[in-house]
Image (tube, grey):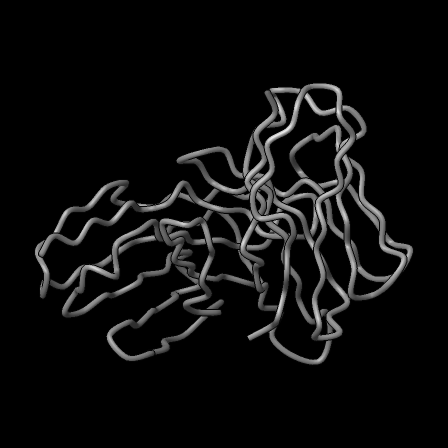
Amino acid sequence: EADIYQTPRYLVIGTGKKITLECSQTMGHDKMYWYQQDPGMELHLIHYSYGVNSTEKGDLSSESTVSRIRTEHFPLTLESARPSHTSQYLCASARGTGGPDTQYFGPGTRLTVL
Amino acid sequence: GIQVEQSPPDLILQEGANSTLRCNFSDSVNNLQWFHQNPWGQLINLFYIPSGTKQNGRLSATTVATERYSLLYISSSQTTDSGVYFCAVDGGGADGLTFGKGTHLIIQP
């Protein structure tokens, strides 16, 4: 199993604030992902990365942005949070080459924007 | 993009019962995973199974890639098995997994 960490686990903030959700993995995985999940619903891919300096948008349009400056770190930023951003955000990683492309998930960040 | 359908959407069983969850997908896939999401929202890997059969304790899974479906079997259910079970496959326009809507399983003591 991969070790993948997300902070904070829970965040309640006011409208208009800038926030960064942190995601780190210690397995040296090349691929990393961000998914968004509304309560009781399925996950949707919002961003992914194949490696350092690689970022792509996923299937679900999102106002968030991501960066990949280091292999182990894939933060997600919202410049101006709104109530519509209230959701759970899950980060995942996968090896990329040399084995099964299993995705491993972090514990998630539950975001509430008031 | 690829479509993933899971059935049943909800399932309530008594402790000790067996169950079968189904996942149908609309196109060929390179990756199929089964997850269990616990009440705290954590996604737990159960199986990576794009084809074939695997077993892990009371859980087993079978994917028939040529017929585009996968089955998850849970035997001798325990209350800790409660939660949402997701099937997810690769495919579509972007890398990453496409998830089904899940099966919400409740195991009653």
At which x and y percent is residue A60?
65, 34
Residue found at x 58% / y 45%: A109
Q: Nearer the viewer, residue B90 or A72?
A: A72
Residue B44 lies in what quarter of the image?
bottom left
At which x and y percent is residue B104?
28, 45
Residue A82 in the image: above or below residue B75: above
* Left or right of B77, for residue B26: right
Which quarter shows the C terminus of chain B? bottom left
Which quarter shows the N terminus of chain B? top right
Residue found at x 75% / y 41%: A20
Residue found at x 14% / y 69%: B76
Residue A59 in the image: above or below residue B88: above
| Number of numbered discs | 0
Residue B80 in the image: above or below residue A90: below
Q: Nearer the viewer, residue A59 or A109?
A: A109
At which x and y percent is residue B78?
18, 64
